[in-house]
Image (cartoon, rainbow, N blue to C red):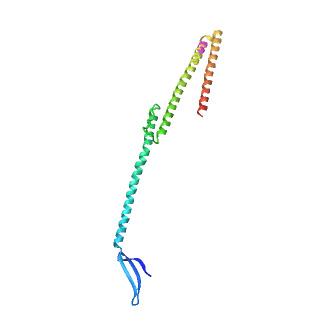
Amino acid sequence: YHSVYVQRIKDANFLIVSHPVETEKFHGYSVIIHSLASYDSVMHSLIILSVLFGIIAIIITATISYIFSAQIAKPITIMANKMRKIRRDGFQEKLELPTEYDETTDLIYTFNDMMIQIEELFDQQRQFVEDASHELRTPLQIIQGHLNLIQRWGKKDPAILEESLDITIEEMNSITKVVEELLRLTKEATYKDA
């Protein structure tokens, strides 16, 4: 039988192949010894190149990943900065729509619609407060005027007292109706939003 093995001799590797040789006149082994120095050198170079190419591949992959993720996140970062500006400057500002459809287009449409609705709600609220203030101010001024009238002359004149009390009660009923209407509108708005 023959054998093949690697043996280290004086810091060098050698490939040794031994094969039995049997003839009528000779019985022995044929042994071939070949230095593996060139093979070891090539393997060493391949390992260094593999490590070097691996490091280069990791650097290239990391760079491409960073650039790609920055490109993906860029529209969202821009949108977040604009939203902060809108929060600071007021609801009248809107986000600009991109010229081409991208991952933020739907978000921008939704955000702008939401800003329009919020602005409309603020306008309605402001108008509501103005209307309610006017509706309540007039009856309160009438009541105050009649109470002043009662205080000056109503104690001595029953007709003035009676008339002022009737008007005051009438105006209080008007205020009650306005307050009830405000409560009704608030409930409707609450149920509508739910």
Q: Position of residue 30 (x, y in %)?
A: 38, 83
- Residue furthest to the bottom in view is 25
- Residue 111 vs 164, above or below: the answer is below
Q: Residue at x 40, y 48 (%)?
A: 67
Task: Work out whether residue 22 or residue 93 is closer to the camera in this orientation and state it.
Answer: 22
* Image point (53%, 27%), residue name: 124
* Foreground pick, 166 / 63: 63
Question: Toward the viewer: 137 or 32?
Answer: 32
* Relative image position of residue 94 (x, y in whole percent): 45, 33
Q: How many marks?
A: 0
- Answer with left or right where residue 76 lies relative to residue 157: left
**Left or right position of 82 against 153:** left
The spot of residue 88 in percent (x, y) is 45, 34
Magenta stretch contains residue 147: yes
Image height of 28 relative to 97, above or below: below
Q: Residue at the front extreme?
A: 24
Q: Classify residue 132 as left or right of residue 86.
A: right
Residue at the spot 61% in from the left edge and 17% down from the top edge: 171
Q: Quadrant of residue 47?
A: bottom left
Magenta-highlighted stretch: main secondary structure?
helix
On whether residue 119 falls in the magenta region, the answer is no
Closer-to-camera residue (100/165): 100
Q: Which residues are magenta?
A: 146-150
Coordinates of residue 159 in the picture (x, y in percent): 65, 9
Q: Specify whether 29 is left or right of 111.
A: left
Question: In which quadrant of the rendered image does the N terminus lie?
Answer: bottom left
Establish if 117 lies above or below 16: above
For the point 64% across and 11% down, which residue is it? 163
Q: Quadrant of the C terminus?
A: top right
From what the image shows, is residue 181 above or below residue 149?
below
